[in-house]
Image: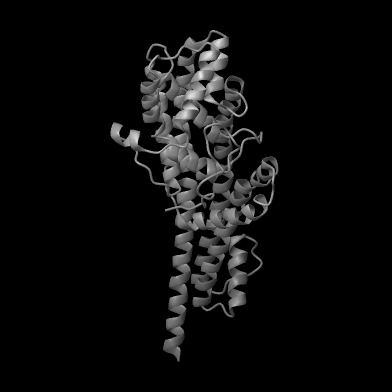
């Protein structure tokens, strides 16, 4: 009987220790590691909260109503995540306290909660229990400090992202579209000024790649205005860069091409973080064979409109379509995936409604 009791307490201590270590590892991956590091525990929390929010959002007929509901998804989940971590740590230490002789389980849980929240209303009776209590109290303080440091970092990145998204509305309309961008710059006779824009957006894409994989919750933070989204903004700029390289009759601008590469790499990396697989670099043959969410008719109609407003176009429309197809194929699939994942607002050339259902929040 004594041997069985010892075995049970040993198993309880090991299980509790594993749960605490597993929770700490998850918190470090989510809040501390400055690189893309997915975690199943964090992914489960985000997935379950997303299902709950989707139950209400999908019942709304108007996009604005869905947007108001989903605006609370990422902040609510982010605040709930440390609570989940603290709860799991409390359960793990409950098992370890019970293994060290604190019985019944209610008393073990009481001591664990008292230590974790540094309330001190439950005293310990031995040195091992005291050491456990100290370590749990320290972990609780570290969790609080980590969250306090994490939120300003996230909101600084969010603010930098949204500043460019808002500025794009002035240049590319509401919702942003590459065709509107060229139309406005042409009427202002400022097509040559696009070079500076490519440089700024190349930097924006580089920052997006870093922040939206290391701070993955940022992906679901919605723009202050319901008709804006970082996804549709990225799509408009990438389409503009692709059109500039493929169809607009202007001197070749390497900065537009570099912006395109930075953009489709960023979208591929962010989509890949959520278990969406796409080839990082396509050969010319693979790009031309890849299906697009826009058609040749869409492209021709856009070119006709650009010609009507005075934008210079290359004479060979067939070659322009082939070149545009090659650029768009690199980011078409991850762009549409991300637009559906975050339920982005409707925008030209970004299909967020037809085809496959809205993907779940799923981490590798």
Tell me, yes or no, if residue 215 can be seen here: no
Q: Toward the viewer: 143 or 76? A: 76
Image point 52% across, 79% down: which residue?
101
Residue 260: horizontal and vertical position, in percent? Answer: 41, 27
Q: Toward the viewer: 297 or 22? A: 297
Image point 50% across, 72% down: which residue?
96
Q: Toward the viewer: 133 or 319? A: 319
Q: Toward the viewer: 273 or 95? A: 273
Tell me, yes or no, if residue 194 can be seen here: yes
Q: How many marks?
A: 0
Q: Is residue 10 above or below residue 168?
A: below
Hey, which quadrant is residue 334 in on the image? top left
Horizontally, is 269 left or right of 133 in the view?
left
Residue 159: horizontal and vertical position, in percent? Answer: 59, 32
Hey, which quadrant is residue 263 in on the image? top left
Image point 45% across, 43% down: which residue?
271
Q: Is residue 304 above or below residue 91?
A: above
Q: Is residue 324 above or below residue 147?
A: above
| Outermost residue toward the top in this view | 189
Quarter of the image where the N terminus is located: bottom left
Residue 304: horizontal and vertical position, in percent? Answer: 51, 19
Residue 39: horizontal and vertical position, in percent? Answer: 45, 54
Q: Is residue 116 above or below residue 79?
A: below
Horizontally, is 60 left or right of 167 in the view?
right
In the rendered view, how is the structure colored? one colour
């Amino acid at each position: 009987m004594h041997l069985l009791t010892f075995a049970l307490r040993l198993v309880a201590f090991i299980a509790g220790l594993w749960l605490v270590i597993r929770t700490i590892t998850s918190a470090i991956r989510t809040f501390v590691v400055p690189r893309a590091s997915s975690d199943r525990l964090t992914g489960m929390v985000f997935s379950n909260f997303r299902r709950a929010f989707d139950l209400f959002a999908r019942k709304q007929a108007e996009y604005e109503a869905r947007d108001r509901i989903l605006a609370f998804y990422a902040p609510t989940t982010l605040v709930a995540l440390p609570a989940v971590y603290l709860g799991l740590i409390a359960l793990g230490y409950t098992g370890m306290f019970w293994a060290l002789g604190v019985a019944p389980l209610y008393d073990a849980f009481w001591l664990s909660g008292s230590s974790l929240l540094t309330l001190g209303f439950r005293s310990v009776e031995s040195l091992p229990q005291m050491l456990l209590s100290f370590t749990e109290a320290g972990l609780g303080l570290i969790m609080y400090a980590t969250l306090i440091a994490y939120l300003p970092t996230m909101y600084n990145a969010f603010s930098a992202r949204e500043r460019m998204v808002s500025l794009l509305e002035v240049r590319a309309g509401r919702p942003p579209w590459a065709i509107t961008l060229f139309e406005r710059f042409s009427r202002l006779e400022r097509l040559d000024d696009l070079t500076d824009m490519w440089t700024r957006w190349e930097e924006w894409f580089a920052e997006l790649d870093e922040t939206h994989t290391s701070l993955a919750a940022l992906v679901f933070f919605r723009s202050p205005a319901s008709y804006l989204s970082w996804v549709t903004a990225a799509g408009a700029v990438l389409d503009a860069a692709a059109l500039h390289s493929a169809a607009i009759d202007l001197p070749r601008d390497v900065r537009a091409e570099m912006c395109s590469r930075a953009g489709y790499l960023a979208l591929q990396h962010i989509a890949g973080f959520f278990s969406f697989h796409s080839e990082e670099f396509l050969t010319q043959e693979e790009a031309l064979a890849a299906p697009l969410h826009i058609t040749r008719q869409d492209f021709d109609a856009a070119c006709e409109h650009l010609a009507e407003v005075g934008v210079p176009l290359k004479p060979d429309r067939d070659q322009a379509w082939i070149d545009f197809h090659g650029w768009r194929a690199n980011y078409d699939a991850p762009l549409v995936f991300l637009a559906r994942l975050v339920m982005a607002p409707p925008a030209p050339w970004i299909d967020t409604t037809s085809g496959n259902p809205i993907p779940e929040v799923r981490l590798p």
